[in-house]
Image (spheres, rainbow, N blue to C red):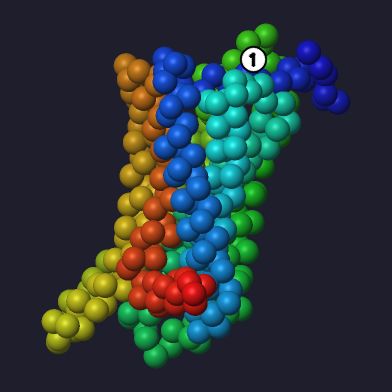
């Protein structure tokens, strides 16, 4: 054991078990996980490349989509390489500070992702309810400031997680029965009163996600009211169509997150393997699905990707 400057003991490393109860199967489970990670990398890098190179896509919706793609890349890359090392090579040790770094990136960019979805809902609200003022209200400068605010919020809310944990003494148990480090899993290894940490974690989660969900819900209520007042059925369908991709992405993020949260807090009789699999799905599925959803449903991106690949084919 080593001692930090504040006399709080911590182990030099932790041990990640992977998927407890499925140790013999996790070698094979890693293959679909690796495929999902590869799809997330290719899809999100493609989205970023298309938006960066096509200046006609430098509009609020696509700029927010680029932010979402970047967040997905960071979120998946902060967990999958180490997870695959655990599954395939039994590389189960993770250094103490590397573990806290993983905690920081996972929770920060989960918050950022939620904030970007909230910003995208505001963009849809302004585009549909105030179409003539859309470019004025959501200028490039405003979009940039909103993106920075979402990032700063994530860092400010999550940083105390890591600092508060380092002030606590750890038990001799170094085993984290999961595939990656996250706040609650690390907190369970602390040999001290962690009520303040737990309360702060809940308050931070509900404050961030609760605020975002309220803004998203209010935005779509206002959108629905505006769309239903449109005289033409085709105009209503077109308006709903512009929101379809965003709604699918919202569901892809919040449904796995909700299942993970509820099973972790209240599913005490649920097998641990199910907890871990849900936690893995929460970090894997949205980064994989988001570029597919926008690639399929957004004509501008779909056409640009098709044209790019067609130009490379002789």
Q: Quadrant of residue 86?
A: top right
Q: Residue at x 66, y 11 (%)?
A: 171
Which residue occupies the extreme bottom position in the image?
132
Q: Residue at x 37, y 86 (%)?
A: 131
Secondary structure type for disc 1: loop
The image shows residue 130 at horizontal and vertical percentages of 37, 84
The image shows residue 160 at horizontal and vertical percentages of 66, 39
Tell how many labels: 1
Q: Is residue 16 left or right of residue 12?
A: left
Above-or-below relation of 313 to 200: below
Q: Quadrant of residue 147?
A: bottom right
Q: Residue at x 55, y 26 (%)?
A: 88
Name the image quarter holding the N terminus. Answer: top right
Q: Quadrant of residue 169?
A: top right
Which residue occupies the extreme top position in the image?
172
Q: Residues within 10 Å of mark 1 (few under 14, many from 20)?
A: some
Q: Examine the rendering and report whether any part of residue 98 can be seen.
A: yes
The image shows residue 296 at horizontal and vertical percentages of 34, 66
The image shows residue 192 at horizontal and vertical percentages of 64, 15
Above-or-below relation of 107 to 309: above
Q: Residue at x 50, y 65 (%)?
A: 47
Q: Where does label 1 land, which residue? A: 174
């Amino acid at each position: 054991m080593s001692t930090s400057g504040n006399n709080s003991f911590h182990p030099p490393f932790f041990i990640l078990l992977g998927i407890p109860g499925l140790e013999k199967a996790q070698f094979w489970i890693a293959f679909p996980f690796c495929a999902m990670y590869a799809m997330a990398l290719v899809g999100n890098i493609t989205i970023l490349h298309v938006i960066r190179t096509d200046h006609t896509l430098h509009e609020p919706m696509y700029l927010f989509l680029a932010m979402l793609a970047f967040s997905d890349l960071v979120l998946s890359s902060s967990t999958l390489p180490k997870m695959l090392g655990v599954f395939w090579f039994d590389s189960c040790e993770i250094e103490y500070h590397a573990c806290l770094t993983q905690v920081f990136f996972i929770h920060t960019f989960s918050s950022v992702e939620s904030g970007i979805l909230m910003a995208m809902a505001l963009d849809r609200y302004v585009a549909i309810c105030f179409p003539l003022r859309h470019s004025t209200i959501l200028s490039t400068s405003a979009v940039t400031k909103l993106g920075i605010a979402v990032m700063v919020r994530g860092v400010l809310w999550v940083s105390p997680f890591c600092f508060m944990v380092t002030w606590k003494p750890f038990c001799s148990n170094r085993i984290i029965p999961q595939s990656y480090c996250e706040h609650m899993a690390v907190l369970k290894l602390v040999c001290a009163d962690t009520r303040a940490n737990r309360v702060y974690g809940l308050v931070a989660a509900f404050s961030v996600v609760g605020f975002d969900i309220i803004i998203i819900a209010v935005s779509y209520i206002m959108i629905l009211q505006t769309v239903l007042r449109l005289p033409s059925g085709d105009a209503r369908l077109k308006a709903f169509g512009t929101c379809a991709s965003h709604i699918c992405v919202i569901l892809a993020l919040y449904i796995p997150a909700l299942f993970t949260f509820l099973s972790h807090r209240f599913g005490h009789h649920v097998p641990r393997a199910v907890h871990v699999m849900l936690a893995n799905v929460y970090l894997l599925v949205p980064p994989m699905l988001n570029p597919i959803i926008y690639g399929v449903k957004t004509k501008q991106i779909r056409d640009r990707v098709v044209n790019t690949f067609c130009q490379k084919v002789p």
